[in-house]
Image (tube, rainbow, N blue to C red):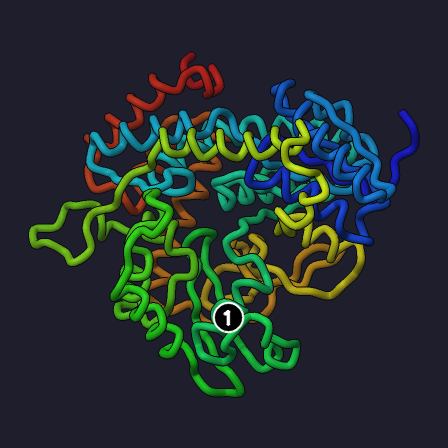
Amino acid sequence: MSENQHPKVVVIGAGSLFFGRQAIWQMVHSPVLNSGTLALVDNQPDRIERMAKLAEMVIAETGVSLKLEASTDWKDVLPGADFVVLSFARNTVYYRGIDCAISEKFGIRMCSGDTIGPGGIFRTMRELPVIMKCIRDIEALCPEAWVINYINPSAINGIALMRYAPQIKSFALCDSLHMPHIKRNNALRAGIISNPAEYTDEIDAAFDMRIAGVNHFTWMLKAEYNGENVMPAIAESIKKLAATEDVGGDKGAKAIHNNRITHKLFEIYGSIPVCVAHTKEYLPFWQGKGTLADDIPPLSIWETEDRYDRHAEMWQQVDNFVSGETPINTYMETFGPDHATDIIENMVGDLGKPFYINTPNRGAVTNMQDDAFLELLCDVDMNGARPRPVGEMPRGLRARQELILDTHELTAEAVIRGDYNLLRQAMMTDPLVTSIADADAILAALLDAEKEAIPQNWFA
């Protein structure tokens, strides 16, 4: 193998349609990255062949000197890596469908089923053992590489890397709070700007917006523009949207009633949930168990068949580029930057941009533990992520954050140790569980239904 061009970025799970295509875009687009190496890995030969062909065509079209490697085995391309992005998932649409259907049978409704509730626990059961296997090979083949976890449940997997692989440099990501978009969008809601083009560095500096929480349970705790509180204006904008809300073009469970739920939670907690498509799933309020009817109906659960259709459409888009049906010269206008590769660009180029990263708290939220694994605005460079100050987490929200963290930490430890008693504790701690008998039934049913995807030591 020829000497690597740096930075070398290895993407494990390049067939991930929510990341692979954008990673190619950013690696080609960025002057900081496009003379390095992009290594694509996917264990499904047909997928890696298609994604590698797409990358080859984009590289040729743009004329950059980016070197491309591709393999079905990560060990082939890990040597020399500067960054390893984990973005794989085993048959996730299928298994999340099982998680959600079985959980609903026993009284738990999940609109996504990938981070909290039985779905979060069992996705960890499927993914974390593979992550740790990969970490052992990273330690052997590229021990100085930064490992970026992009696999849900991002916080649980990030906690596991922090606690059980401390020798590896790592942090975890989610694209829900991609900067600068999240801040600019709320500047629009607040009336600070009337269109995105008006957002400048000066406005950014004057807009003090602070967000914190466990991944997918993050809340806007402060929003001030030139010292004036603009959170009520943001909430009022959301309320106006909620008044005429429908599901729009996306009828998926994660898209339904989000503005109504956001404003309802703001009324209760005085803070705005900023990832409500997931946050609503962390709460017991819309599980359909109340005596009186709520003005917001119970959560609609994960839509397996619609997700299959959506993935098929995305693969068709890739195939159309590869076949030439869609001109490859339109690729750079079709896609855009990705959260992970934006951060890699920032780290390599020492660009000084802040990003939301899942990392130990380290005092950013003053009334939570230093090792609480939170999603926080960070300064990040080749030395790692340094959270910016947030202040206190409000009392009611802090209680829910701690419960979620305890669930996540128990889940990570249970999976690492293969300990059923800890797994059961995680289920009984989970904020959605209200019945011991139902929780035990869910555990038994999911262990049986997903035995092919779960390490066999659980069945010894």
Image quadrant occupied by the N terminus: top right
Taking 458 as reference, is 375 left or right? right
Crowdedness of circle 1 by 10 Å Cα count: few (<14), some, many (20+)? Answer: some
Q: In which quarter of the image is residue 444?
A: top left
Percent coordinates x, y for residue 353 in the rendering:
69, 65
Residue position marked by numbered label 1 in the rendering: 210
Residue at horizontal 66%, vertical 39%? Answer: 85
Percent coordinates x, y for residue 329 in the rendering:
72, 43
User: Is residue 145 at least partly visible in the picture?
Assistant: yes
Residue at horizontal 63%, vertical 51%? Answer: 336
The residue lying furthest to the left in this view is 291
Q: In which quarter of the image is residue 45?
A: top right
Taking 221 as reference, is 444 left or right? left
Percent coordinates x, y for residue 167 in the rendering:
70, 40
User: Is residue 422 at least partly visible in the picture?
Assistant: no
Residue at horizontal 54%, vertical 69%? Answer: 184
Q: In front: 77, or 130?
A: 77
Taking 165 as reference, is 105 left or right? left
Q: Which amino acid does label 1 sit on?
A: Arg
The residue lying furthest to the right in this view is 3
The residue lying furthest to the bottom in this view is 227
Residue at horizontal 61%, vertical 20%? Answer: 44
Q: In front: 281, or 333?
A: 333
> Residue 421, relative to residue 334: is it above or below?
above
Percent coordinates x, y for residue 35 in the rendering:
86, 45
